[in-house]
Image: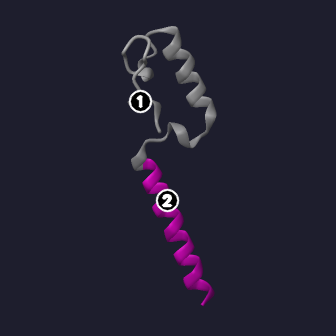
Amino acid sequence: MTYDRLVCANCAAPVSEGRCPVCRANRERLQQESFFAGLNPVALIALLAVLVAAVVLLAHQTV
């Protein structure tokens, strides 16, 4: 899940805005967890489509 959709329980603001110390701490933690956590779903789908196309092309060339 991307942190831009999360709402802070402490201040009821989006975590991505970082209005309170709790928001800022959670935003930093989510950014450090993984590279893919920061990507939006459209970018992940595009990356998956490119990988599938590369596998199909590679399989087609080996036949």
Q: Could you tell whether 2 is left or right of 13 in the image?
A: right
Task: Please tell me which residue is depicted at 43% across the width and 19% down the height of the picture.
Answer: 8
Residue 24 in percent (x, y) is at 52, 15
Q: How is the image coloured?
A: one colour
Residue 20 in percent (x, y) is at 47, 9
Give the SS element for disc 1.
helix
Above or below, 37 against 58 in this view is above
Give the SS element for disc 2.
helix
Badge 2 vs badge 1, beta-carbon distance below 8 Å: no
Circle 1: residue type? Asp
Task: Please tell me which residue is depicted at 40% across the width and 11% down the height of the picture.
Answer: 11
| Residue 4 image label | 1
The CA distance from mark 2 to mark 1 is 21 Å
Along the viewing direction, whichever of 22 and 27 lies nearer the viewer? 22
Residue 26 in percent (x, y) is at 54, 21
Q: Main secondary structure of the magenta part?
A: helix
Is 47 included in the stretch rendered in magenta? Answer: yes
Residues shaded magenta = 43-63
Above or below, 14 against 5 in this view is above
